[in-house]
Image (cartoon, rainbow, N blue to C red):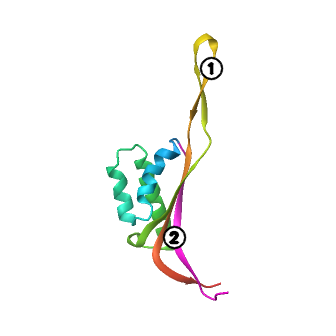
Amino acid sequence: MRNKKKSEIGARALGKNIRASAIKIRRITDRIRGCSYGEALVSPEFMPYKTCYLISQLILSAAANANTNFGLDKSDLFISEARVESSAYLKRFRPRAQGRGYPIKKPTCKVTIKSDSNFIGEIEE
């Protein structure tokens, strides 16, 4: 076993019950994964999708969490993980012919943005 453990210091932001399809949000998160904080914050502004604003807010939240909880500088951060998971469907019914109801499924998803610092330190137990 090794005596010294190296780990990346970082924080995360979690967005729950976002009312959009997971596929549509993955278009954005695939482009920002691995980018620096500044680049990840600017790139969704130039994409023509409505969920770009939500992703930008999560990036800001992850950076604020890293700054508040760990005292990290925002210029040293990068997006290490951007994960999108499908969540429960909102189920609605639409009236159809002859008194029938037609189900409408409105998808929701959960987004996790994790930001790590380029600083690699040692953890003492």
Observer-side mark, 1 or 2, equals 1
Q: Residue at x 67, y 87 (%)?
A: 1
> For the magenta stretch, what is the residue range?
1-18
Q: Which residue is mark 2?
A: 10
Query: Residues at badges 1 and 2 in contact (C-beta under 8 Å)?
Result: no
Q: Position of residue 40 (x, y in %)?
A: 39, 60
Q: Is residue 16 visible?
A: no
Helix, strand or loop for disc 1: strand
Along the horizontal axis of the image, is 88 left or right of 78?
Answer: right
Q: Residue at x 56, y 46 (%)?
A: 109
Q: Extreme top residue here?
A: 98
Q: Residue at x 34, y 57 (%)?
A: 42
Q: Which residue is mark 1?
A: 101
State how far apart marks 1 and 2 are (Cα): 48 Å
Residue 31, placed above or below residue 22? below
| Disc 1 residue crowd, few under 14, some 14–19, many 20+, Cα 10 Å | few
Helix, strand or loop for disc 2: strand
